[in-house]
């Protein structure tokens, strides 16, 4: 496995010279942030990310995310042109040495939380989710905003968009995903890039919007649409693990050879559809981190891994979920977990 760390570019308070000091860190996970979804990334921007990483002794082999514009997810008349732009990004990234692209197919909203700074007993704070609160903050009726929301929509635009998704429903979304995959995956295959879809976070419908990358059955359906290695998964433990119906150890083992990117995050589930984010080790939360990593290693996983959301600790302020300290602790925990499991199976490490 290769241990990586998400970096939000030059405005990220967590700088590359800090990231490089985390033991065993091989590279960054980043993206071009100043281009609208659907547009082609300039080669200069891509190469500048790569050279900034390389100058700090880090690789740039993973992109998170190349966002999929709503028009592709809705299958509008502009979709074919936007899919072609997407393919062009895959080509350009492949040429620059990127090996894995993470993306998601969530309508309108990316990850959703009800609270950004939930206080823990030990003074840390973290993101939290409470379904009742989220639903009471319906974007169509409330002026409050939640993290993960695209603030660029007016209420009218948002309402029109939500209506369109309600109209196409889950099967319509599957259909549009199929069109996307059938165009993009062959290009990824030619360019030596693995595509890794991120599960929906949380993995259930919200505000009547269909969400489909949610559970074992749907992951299997997804992988079978284009049964090629390049059509793979980002296995995000915090996202999939929020649903009590998902058996993550089983899923990790079953899908290991199609998992290209692993997001390790732990959450404490306090009731159905209610959880908060915790430190990475297994005993801090409800997710069996050891069991998942073991199932992956046992089944030949050899992809990229990153510590996902951390708490805010030691007085750090920063991008929610993406401070330095707790993610760095997570990274060393993850490195230890892999070393223990791999060595117990006879894998040797080069010095
Ligand atoms: C949240 C992240 C997601 C993820 C996208 C991938 O912290 O895990 O925002 O980057 O869903 O497309």
Image: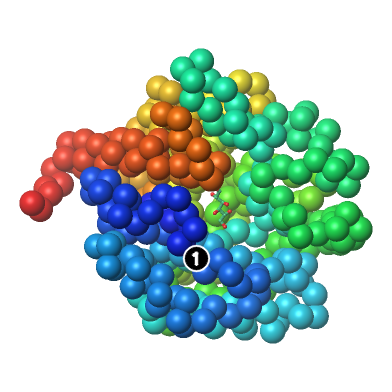
Q: Secondary structure at mark 1?
A: loop
Judge from the rendering whether residue 223 lies leftward or rightward of residue 249; answer left or right. right
How is the rendered protein coloured? rainbow
129 up-or-down from 156: above or below:
above
In the image, the residue with mark 1 has its CB under 8 Å from the nearest atom of ligand 1: no
298 up-or-down from 124: above or below:
below
Which residue corresponds to the image point at 17% horizontal and 36% vertical from the top-left?
Answer: 344
In x, y percent, where is residue 173?
Answer: 74, 61
Residue 160 visible (yes or no):
yes
- The residue lying furthest to the top in this view is 121
Which residue corresponds to the image point at 46% horizontal and 35% vertical from the top-left?
Answer: 316
Q: Quadrant of residue 272?
A: top right
Foreground residue among 315 and 207: 315
Which residue corresponds to the image point at 77% horizontal and 30% vertical from the top-left?
Answer: 133
User: Tag count in the figure?
Assistant: 1
Which residue corresponds to the image point at 65% horizontal and 70% vertical from the top-left?
Answer: 37
In x, y percent, where is residue 299?
Answer: 33, 48
Judge from the rendering whether residue 200 lies leftward or rightward of residue 164; answer left or right. left
Foreground residue among 165 and 35: 35
Residue 300 visible (yes or no):
no
- The residue lying furthest to the left in this view is 351
In x, y percent, where is residue 221?
Answer: 60, 56
Q: Residues within 10 Å of mark 1 (few under 14, many from 20)?
A: many
In x, y percent, where is residue 220?
Answer: 56, 54
Foreground residue among 92 and 348: 92
Q: Which residue is mark 1?
A: 31
267 up-or-down from 321: above or below:
above
């Amino acid at each position: 496995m290769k241990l990586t760390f998400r970096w939000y570019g030059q405005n990220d308070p967590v700088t590359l010279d800090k990231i490089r000091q985390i033991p065993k860190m091989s590279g960054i996970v980043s993206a071009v942030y100043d281009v609208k979804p659907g547009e082609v990334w300039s080669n200069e921007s891509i190469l500048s990310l790569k050279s900034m990483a390389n100058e700090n002794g880090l690789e740039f082999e993973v992109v998170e995310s190349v966002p999929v514009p709503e028009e592709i997810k809705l299958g509008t008349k502009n979709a074919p042109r936007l899919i072609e732009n997407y393919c062009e990004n895959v080509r350009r990234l492949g040429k620059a040495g990127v090996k894995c692209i993470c993306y998601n197919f969530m309508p309108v909203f990316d990850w959703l939380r009800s609270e950004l700074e939930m206080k823990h007993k030990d003074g840390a704070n973290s993101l939290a989710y409470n379904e009742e609160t989220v639903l009471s903050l319906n974007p169509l009726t409330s002026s409050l905003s939640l993290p993960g929301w695209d603030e660029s929509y007016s209420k009218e635009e948002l309402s029109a968009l939500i209506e369109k998704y309600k109209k196409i429903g889950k099967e319509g979304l599957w259909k549009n995903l199929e069109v996307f995959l059938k165009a993009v995956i062959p290009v990824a295959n030619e360019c030596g890039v693995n595509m890794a879809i991120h599960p929906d976070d949380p993995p259930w419908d919200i505000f009547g919007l269909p969400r489909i990358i949610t559970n074992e059955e749907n992951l299997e359906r997804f992988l079978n649409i284009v049964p090629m290695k390049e059509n793979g998964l980002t296995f995000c433990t915090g996202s999939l693990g929020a649903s009590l119906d998902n058996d993550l150890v089983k899923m990790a083992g079953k899908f290991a050879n199609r998992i290209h990117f692993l997001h390790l995050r732990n959450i404490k589930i306090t009731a159905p559809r209610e959880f908060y984010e915790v430190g990475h080790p297994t005993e801090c939360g409800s997710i069996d981190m050891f069991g998942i990593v073991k199932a992956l290693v046992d089944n030949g996983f050899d992809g990229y891994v990153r510590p996902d959301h951390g708490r805010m600790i030691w007085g750090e302020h920063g991008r929610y979920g993406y401070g330095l300290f707790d993610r760095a602790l997570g990274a060393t925990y993850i490195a230890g977990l892999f070393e223990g499991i791999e060595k117990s199976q006879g894998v040797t490490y080069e010095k």
